[in-house]
Image (cartoon, rainbow, N blue to C red):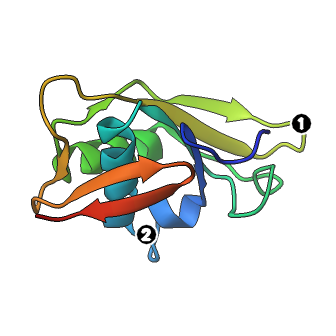
Amino acid sequence: METEHTQKEYKSLKKAYGTKANLKELAETCVCFANAQGGVLYIGIEDKEKLPPENQTITQEIVNNVLSRLRSLTDSVGLGDAIIETDENGGEYFHFKVFPTSRTIATTSSGKIFLRVQDKCYPITG
């Protein structure tokens, strides 16, 4: 897999699902993409890794729950359908497109605005 850049981000499955999930952070990443050129979010790839953990399994129920929560944690953010893929090592991950906003500013449900610059998200204030 390619490295992260302006339109691509990898996140651990632990960030999206389970006891250590941080969906607010993922929602901020979606807002960043939406306020820039859009992008693709890959869930199930550990930070600094190129592959999912071996034998990691992802169910459609997990995917549906993650997308549903992200939609409830964002405003004016368009999310495409998620696709579950299996890597050569047997590990599964999923990815979905975040569409760029065209007429509004995307925000988190709490009103925060973020913008993607290169491979980082920055808060916008004022």
Residue 18 shown left or right of residue 53 in the figure? left
Q: Can you say whether 27 is above or below 22 in the image?
A: above
Whether residue 23 is visible:
no
Q: Quadrant of the C terminus?
A: bottom left
Q: Nearer the viewer, residue 19 or 29?
A: 29
Q: Earlier in the sequence, mark 1 or mark 2?
A: 2
Q: Residue drawn 69% across and 61% down?
A: 46
Q: Which residue is mark 2?
A: 21
Q: Residue drawn 26% across and 51% down?
A: 69
Q: Nearer the viewer, residue 7 or 48?
A: 7
Name the residue at the front extreme. Answer: 126
Q: Quadrant of residue 37?
A: top left
Residue 47 shown left or right of residue 60 in the figure? right
Asked if labels 2 and 1 touch by Cβ distance under 8 angstroms, the answer is no
* Residue 88 badge: 1
Q: Nearer the viewer, residue 39 or 88?
A: 39
Query: What kind of residue is marked 2?
Result: Ala
Q: Nearer the viewer, residue 108 or 55?
A: 108
Q: Say few, some or many: other residues with alpha carbon within 10 Å of mark 1 (under 14 / 14 to 19 / 20 or more).
A: few
Query: What kind of residue is marked 1?
Result: Glu
Q: Position of residue 59 (x, y in %)?
A: 54, 42
Q: Position of residue 18 (x, y in %)?
A: 46, 68
Whether residue 125 is visible:
yes
Q: Residue drawn 33% across and 57% down?
A: 28
Q: Can you say whether 91 is above or below 39 in the image?
A: below
> Callout 1: helix, strand or loop?
loop
Name the residue at the bottom extreme. Answer: 20
